[in-house]
Amino acid sequence: MTTTVQTANHQELVGLIWSIADKLRGPYRPPQYRQVMLPMIVLRRLDSVLEPTKEAVLAAKTKYEKVLTGEAFEKAIAKVAIGENRKQPLYNLSEFTFKKLLGDSEGLADNLRAYINGFSPLARDIFDKFDFDKQIQKLDEANRLYEVMQAIASPDVDLSPAHLSNLQMGYLFEELVRKFNEQANEEAGDHFTPREVIRLMVNLVFCEEEVVFKKGIYRTVYDPTAGTGGMLSVAEEYIKRQNPDANLALFGQEYNPESYAICCSDLLIKDEPINNLVYGDTLGLKDAKQKSNNFVPHDGHSDKQFHYMFANPPFGVEWKPEKDFIESEYQTLGFKGHFGAGLPRINDGSLLFLQHMISKMYPAPEAKGDGSRIAIVFNGSPLFTGDARLNFQVSEERLARLWEQTAFQNLATSKKRKDEKAKQLEIEMGQDLQKEIIAALYCLDGNKVYLSREGFVKDMEKVLKQAGLKLKSPVKKAILAALGETDPEAEICQDSKGNVEPDTSLRDTEIVPLPEDIPLPLPLEYDRKTGLDGLNKLVKVHCLAYLEAVVLPHVTDAWIDFDKTKVGYEIPLNRHFYVYQPPRPLAAIEEDIKSLEADIMAMLGEVV
């Protein structure tokens, strides 16, 4: 019953705060509401925590500021402000509270700034990352600051510790983050990962884990792309629900200041350490300019390993800003660094984050280590990105593949069926040609890796000509197929007309609805008269618009092969004719099972 009441109260508060956000309509569009509401909710919660000790803190400030400085002063003030109830230092040295601020509507904006500047350093940094000063000015100029603060200060919006525990307030804040992020309609792969996706990842990581549920166990959880902290909080919630005595340390890094502020707010509200969350670029920036906002231009946990790691790295985003740093580390450190396995194409850095996480794994239990587990979200780009990029090498392994190519095998076959001697002679001549081809290819440097197909073909033609060999096109294609391997660093392959060649192994098919204004009926034809050219003209612009809107944001180098485009009608039978049949009641199924069991026992009785 208590849980039901708490849940109802939780949803009531969320709905109330959501309605207050509508007061911003006009100066703000709905996707921008979070820029005001999230820092305002954090401010109201911190004020509710600190208000009971405000007078004592001001007295302590007068007492200690002449005899203590730096960290000693902060610890002394924090002890007065929060006593033994909280572990993380929190205080405010200004004379204001939320209620006192509302007593001076004319000076509200300046007083609010002074109030925020009076917070302890970690809390003040959160509001700096929110860039809340800019919102205060905008609200004040639009005459909405007092109205919004008054609504949030209402007794109905009770965010005090007496009404909401740290954990309950954390859940409330996370729900608001989710709703505001959905309202903002973030681009795929950015900021916000749906909770159901996170829960799936967490369940997969912990489904066979037993150690983490031992009483008093210490474990670390890490997210190199922390965002608003959803993966960290859901993983913590999952473990704590089944093992309240577990000692968990949450670590992360985030380069977006607003996301970092939201994540830190969640941790501070729940009275958990913020110092383990780093503001900076996980992959690294070379020759980064010094910033005044504590930005870390490299891995902020370079000396650490972690037990559990989760990430939804940004996809379809170029890593050009980090290119110099990453390439330098790759060339100098190799597998001793983060990126030893190789570097992906410049517009898909997901593999970089995966390698980063792998570098932070503990040795496996078989090697007397704790072991680590990783869950990471990848988009489909590595599966269906369209251009062909191949490297070529005349190594023993690749030459062995040449014998598997049908065109090369056919050199030593014969179509002569009646004349056995002529057939055998043709086979032997083909076998000799195969050996001559292999011998000619051995003349190329076996250690050289060609990143250009054009360069490799040029050298190949040279050695074949020197050997006096003139090969047909299918055999040349067989050689290229055997000696080539996909390589994102290689040059894009082009045909004789300079058109980009597709990598057919990465081809994907999209079903696109016909344009609403297409003239019907379609000019369909049959057999060899397909009318494809005419149909393509009707849908080409529509398909290109679909590609730009739906595909290119995630796969920047995708393109359409209109020669393989099919236009027509589809009748989805299930959608139109399927009739849902609800499952039978469990009681009826149970009765059937009992009846079958009785029949089986009776039959066994007859046998015995």
Image: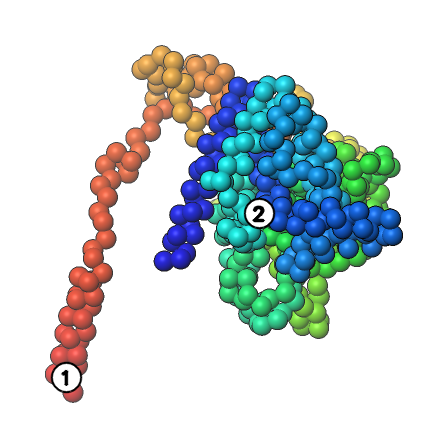
- SS type, badge 2: helix
Q: Label 2, on which residue?
A: 230
Q: Nearer the viewer, residue 520 or 360?
A: 360
Relative side of 234 to 9, left or right: right
**Tag 1: amino acid:** Gly
Residue 412 visible to an observer of this rendering:
no
Tell which residue pokes out farthest to the bottom in this image: 608
Up-down: is 282 above or below 27?
Answer: below
- Answer with the quarter of the image where residue 109 lies: top right
Q: Position of residue 398 (x, y in %)?
A: 70, 49
Q: Position of residue 59 (x, y in %)?
A: 75, 48
Q: Label 1, on which residue?
A: 605
Q: Quadrant of the N terminus?
A: bottom left
- Answer with the quarter of the image where residue 143 lies: top right
At x 68% / y 58%, what residue is drawn? Answer: 83
Q: Position of residue 49 (x, y in %)?
A: 61, 48
Estimate how packed mark 2 is, as few (under 14), some (14 to 19) or many (20 or more) residues with alpha carbons within 10 Å. many
Q: Nearer the viewer, residue 36 or 234?
A: 36
**Tag 2: amino acid:** Gly
At x 46% / y 32%, what residue is drawn? Answer: 19
